[in-house]
Image (cartoon, rainbow, N blue to C red):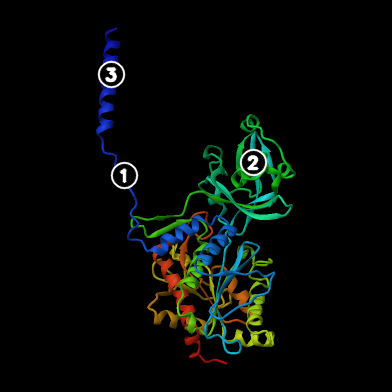
Amino acid sequence: MVGCGLLKQFSRSFKRSNSLSSSTATIVGSTHKVDYSTTNKEALDFLDFLNASPSPFHAVHEASVRLEKAGFQKISEKHEWNLKKKGKYYFTRNGSSLVAFVIGGEYHVDKGGFSIVGAHTDSPCLKVKPVSKKEQQGYLEVGVQLYGGGIWHTWFDRDLGIAGRVMVKQADGSFRHTLVDIKKPILRVPTLAIHLDGSVNDAFKFNKETHMVPILATAAKSALNELKKGNDETDKHHTALIHLLSNKMNVDIDQIHDFELCLFDTQAATLGGIYDEFIYSARLDNLGMTYCSLMALIESKNIQEDKNIRLISLFDNEEIGSTSAHGANSNLLPSTLERIVASIKPSVNTKLALEKAIHKSMLVSADMAHAVHPNYAEKYEENHRPQMHKGTVIKINANQKYATTAATSLILREIARQRSIPIQEFVVRNDSPCGSTIGPMLSAKLGLRTVDVGNPQLSMHSIREISGVDDVKHGIDLLKSFFELFPEIDAKVFID
């Protein structure tokens, strides 16, 4: 009994002591607020662009909002174009690709060309299957397709939302493309516990069809929260998912008729590193260069003196080869150039005028590049190891995986030199595979001089990638200078 009393007394004393220490202790970092005052405004704005763009549809919408705010007029491929000098125009195709252009004040059909920047809006991701309803071992799951060449193991154990477009039936019987963005982490692809797979740290192997199936809910909770079924979509997809979409868009479930939805990491884009010098985010490839292209066109000056047409083309489907109605291998860019020429001077022989203009034009194919990885430096050619904060990278490949030539590289270098903008170079090792871009494809399709460039990044095609804060401004400055200086520099380059 004496021992028991002492134990109780000690317990009361410990609780008082613990309570006192908790109330007076200093918790380091508990009130810490990140100071972004020294970060360049371009990088902070880029974070906003990333977080507003969980899908190509959202990226195009966000770009459209910025263009209209900058005075660009929306036109449509379905209608006639009445274009004027110094006019600013844009249009979208499929809601996932976008073309914007500004007509120079000194542009003449027989004398001027096009200053073009091309980028892409898509990134590797998981896409919801047309019939996604799955149930296994008491779990409701969502069937997905793998889009592009992702580093798929990085998608395990991440908090995933859903975003994309839904075709919504209107009261008048029409159907409207409607964006949806579920930022709530409703899905997750769990890994198998190490206790059940002792080899996981030696080689993480998984089946893409059977193991990469995100969990939505348990069957038990779903039964307790039984929801009304609607049209055929609730036969193809879990009713809870359809209801979530309808609530988010404020429409009835019977108004939902098909959709294109991709999964995305709900962790927002943010600055990182002890000096806030890195950008940690999904979809840096290629929203990084999409953003730089967009802002360069919006911010470029001296349009009244330009003899060219400044144009950006943001394509979808680059990650799967670009062969679609809205990819770089479509007629999107060729038909746009032709229609611009025909609209400005209807009496001209459009085909001949365009062929002449092409040889006064140049394309900057803007797609993110590889920064040297400190832990895998041996994977990089020893004289071509791009670093963050040291400028946009010119990409060169002898086998034309990149479309850069000596002439196009020279032009871009001279533009950078005149504006004191840093430039780097990248070449893959001879014993290494090489990725490609829209550059060679468009160069061959149009007979168009092309240079491939991109800002350096790490972890390309991971669900979370890394790039440098300073390179956002470098990329915008380089592309903006290209728009402003290309006709002048090109006039001093002689080949054919």
Q: From what the image shows, is residue 379 above or below residue 439?
A: above
- Expressed as whole percent of the image width and height from the top left, the position of residue 42 reads 41, 64
* Residue pointed to by mark 1: 29
Q: Earlier in the sequence, mark 2 or mark 1?
A: 1
Per the model, the C-alpha gap separating discs 2 and 1 is 40 Å
Residue occupying the point 44% across, 83% down: 414
Q: Give, as a three-letter code, the residue at label 2.
A: His
Residue occupying the point 68% across, 38% down: 135
- Position of the N terminus, as image quadrant, is top left
**Image quadrant assignment for residue 472:** bottom left
* Residue pointed to by mark 3: 12
- Position of the C terminus, as image quadrant, is bottom right
Instruction: Give me the disc on residue 243.
Output: 2
SS at circle 2? helix
Q: Give, as a three-letter code, the residue at label 1.
A: Gly
Q: Which of marks 1 and 3 is nearer the N terminus?
A: 3
Q: Earlier in the sequence, mark 3 or mark 2?
A: 3
Q: Are marks 2 and 1 in contact (CB under 8 Å)?
A: no
